[in-house]
Image (cartoon, grey):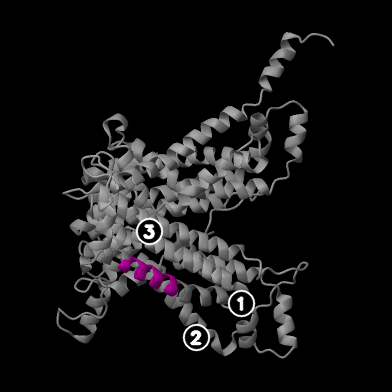
Amino acid sequence: MSPLTPASATGKLLRVDLFLPAFLVLALVLAVLVLFPLFWLFRSSVMDSSGALTLGNFATLVTDATMRKPFLLAIGMALGVGALSCLIATPLAWLVSRTDLPGRGVVRALVTASFVTPPFLGAIAWEILAAPNSGMINVLYRYLTDSPTDTFLVNIYTFSGLIFAIACYTFPYVFTLVANGLDRVPSDLEDASAILGGRTMLTLRRVTIPLVMPAMLAGSLIAILQALTMFGSPAILALPAGFHVITTKIWSLFQFPAKPGLAAAASLPLLLITILLLQGKSWILGRKGYTVLGGKSGEAKLLRLRKWKPLAIVFVVAVMSLTVLLPYAALVKTALTRNVSESLTWATLTLHNFQFVFFELSATQLAMRNTFLLGFLTATIGTAISVLTAYMVARNTVAGARLLGFLATAPVAIPGIVLGVGLFLTYSHPQLMLYGTLWILLIAFLTIEMPAGYQQMSSAFHGIHPELEEASRILGASRLNTLRLITAPLLRTSVIATWCFIFIGTIRELSAAILLTTSNTKLVSVIIYDLNESGDLGAISVLGLTLLAVTFTVVFLANRLPVLGGQRVPGS
């Protein structure tokens, strides 16, 4: 055998597989993102102010009524949101998927709008609509009925009002799963029921609903989980009503005098409940009892609504009005008038709020810059980590690659407020002082968005056959070069969709950000929350509409991309 020439030796060096060091680096990065905050969370929960071990914080959770009540209220609120979301979404999904309802595509688009609307912004919109004194609905009611000024028709500052406001922006989770489940139900089974004499409602009750029941339950669990771990809507609606849920109570423990150890202890039960809910969802969707076996089924026939069509249209218009149309109209109207109580006319029309927000409010430009910088960095770094992690796990490039998948998925079980507490405790020490910088926010957003990015890219990689990669390897390319030159271009649509999804999730995040921002690291979501406390609803509406405009622009551009084996942005 002839000795290696310099050129061939160089080729050998270029083909050295760098996936082992890449695996070690990724494992370290993901461990720091996920495990480090959890370690400090557990540590702080069992330490007193002097650093001694104690179970006093957990004892306080059990014995102090001001800590027990927020847990119970949060659980009741979450269950109410899950039930209401299911009641709204299930018939809506059936009408859109299985009937000749007019404008089904428009309804799906409006559900998407509800999905991408930050829940805290929706809560503020309903504050504008249904506050007992200044709410537009109550003002109109008093005008039409000539009622006293202290009379109101609806009051959003109640426990039931909070459940309603949150359900308006969690029902899309149930809708999406149920609609997808209905799309997969074989028409053969429904046809067989009809042949055997089953009427439409009997077929629906005996065949269709049992087949989509797992999707309904899983969607309801997701809605419950979203409500339980949400901070923004309860902070906006529950605190003025005079009660706490657990997320707002944890936040209040960082007000003076701060009780970080108690906050850490209160975060752990919330973390445990989240894990149990996610496990329940996985168990429901993973059951085999409802799996349909067989070949390709015929396309489902659309049910003709006939005399029920007007009633169905009224139901759909009511749902879309309450969840999207009225809140958006309230934001637009408030942005264009000086006072919430003013009607929108040519005489009251003004751009004062836009002038104030973009040219007079000093914090706006800094918050905009911080928000979009963090959105860009989180999306770019998060997508790169997701691509490399998903590739290693899907192709099992090194021993232990599945560990990366576990670490990348684990943050889905960490509520934003819990992660915020963990990061605050981790990076507020002199040795690791990142609190007060954008770095701690970047770490938080990467951790929060990592599961979604990884799951999207993992699904995309499993849809690509490894034959082309094997051919590239046979021709001498390293695995990293194969990923860069062969696999990534095939999945460029999925990569871009993942980038967009992470970007959108970042710019609307509030639960973790509320604990980690300072005056120099304000974000748009935090500015909106701060302005709500001062009652400046006009400025809030301008910032909220700006956030929505950016979000919808990103979704629109992402969904104009050709589908090349990837997924579009969820909700589209």
Rounded to the nearest angstrom, the CA distance separating label 2 from label 1 is 25 Å
Please give the residue where the numbered disc 2 appears in the rendered image. Answer: 311
Label 2 amino acid? Leu
Give amino acid for label 1: Pro
Q: Read off the residue under disc 3.
A: 229
Numbered mark located on residue 14 in the image: none
Q: Main secondary structure of the magenta part?
A: helix
The answer to which of marks 2 and 3 sits earlier in the sequence is 3
Q: Nearer the viewer, mark 2 or mark 1?
A: 1
Within 10 Å of disc 1 (Cα), the crowding (few <14, some 14-19, many 20+) is few
Over which residues does the magenta segment extend? 72-84
Q: Label 1's element?
A: helix
- Residue 258's x, y, as percent? 20, 48
> Is residue 77 part of the magenta span, yes or no?
yes
Which one is earlier in the sequence, the residue at label 3 or at label 1? 1
Is 120 situated left or right of 380 in this image? left
| Residue 392 % position (x, y) | 62, 38
Could you tell me residue 226's position as x and y percent? 42, 61
Tell me how far mark 3 sits from mark 1, CA to CA. Answer: 29 Å
Q: Residue at x 57, y 66 (%)?
A: 284
Q: Please state which amino acid type lies under the numbered disc 3.
A: Thr
